[in-house]
Image (cartoon, rainbow, N blue to C red):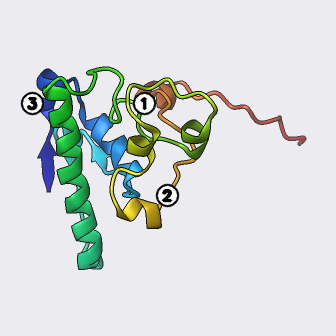
């Protein structure tokens, strides 16, 4: 199924990539973004997904909609919020300094199951498509 997130760009400054990255904080694999329609997420659960996993996805999407509503209502910042800064790594959440306008708890443990089945992303958000288009190898050259 395809979820159209374009209305949230205007109402909360939230884009499909923000929701996709936030799903990682819920221990859900980031879905396809903007294909086949720009501003959307394409989620393709297979017949092998259990009801438990489908319920987890539904719960995460409902929770994320609540996070977007908090931005729309002015309770959260349009630029410094759990969606714009997702995913949250263990390193970022446990660092001595925390300068975000939301709690570490909100960043790392957005729902009850994330305390038991926590997946920590290895890296935070990089720079989206720019990094894909401008690859830089940091490996040492191999001897031939």
Quarter of the image holding residue 105? top left
Residue 90 in view (yes/no) = yes
Could you classify mark 3 by the number of other residues whose Cα lies within 10 Å: few (under 14), some (14-19), or many (20 or more)?
A: few
Determine the CA span between mark 3 and mark 1.
21 Å
Sequence-first tag of 3 and 2: 3
Determine the CA span between mark 1 and mark 2.
21 Å
112 lies left or right of 108: left
Residue 65 position, x and y percent, is 17, 44
Reading the image, the residue beneath label 1 is 128
Reading the image, the residue beneath label 3 is 7
Given the current orientation, which residue lies at the most extreme left position? 7
Label 1 residue SS:
helix
Label 2 residue SS:
loop
Sequence-first tag of 1 and 2: 2
Task: Identify the residue at horizontal 26%, vertical 55% (top origin).
Answer: 60
Quarter of the image holding residue 71? top left
Determine the CA span between mark 3 and mark 2.
29 Å
Residue 84 position, x and y percent, is 35, 29
């Amino acid at each position: 199924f395809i979820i159209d997130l374009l209305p949230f760009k205007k109402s909360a400054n939230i884009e499909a990539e923000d929701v996709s990255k936030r799903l990682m904080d819920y221990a859900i694999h980031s879905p396809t973004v903007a294909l086949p329609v720009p501003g959307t997420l394409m989620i393709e659960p297979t017949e092998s997904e259990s009801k438990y996993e489908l319920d987890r996805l539904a719960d995460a999407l409902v929770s994320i909609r609540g996070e977007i509503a908090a931005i729309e209502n002015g309770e959260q910042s349009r630029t410094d919020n759990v969606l714009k800064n997702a995913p949250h790594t263990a390193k970022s959440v446990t660092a001595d300094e925390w300068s975000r306008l939301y709690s570490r708890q909100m960043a790392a443990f957005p729902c009850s199951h994330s305390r038991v089945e926590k997946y920590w992303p290895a890296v935070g958000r990089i720079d989206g498509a720019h990094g894909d288009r401008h690859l830089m190898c940091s490996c040492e050259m191999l001897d031939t």
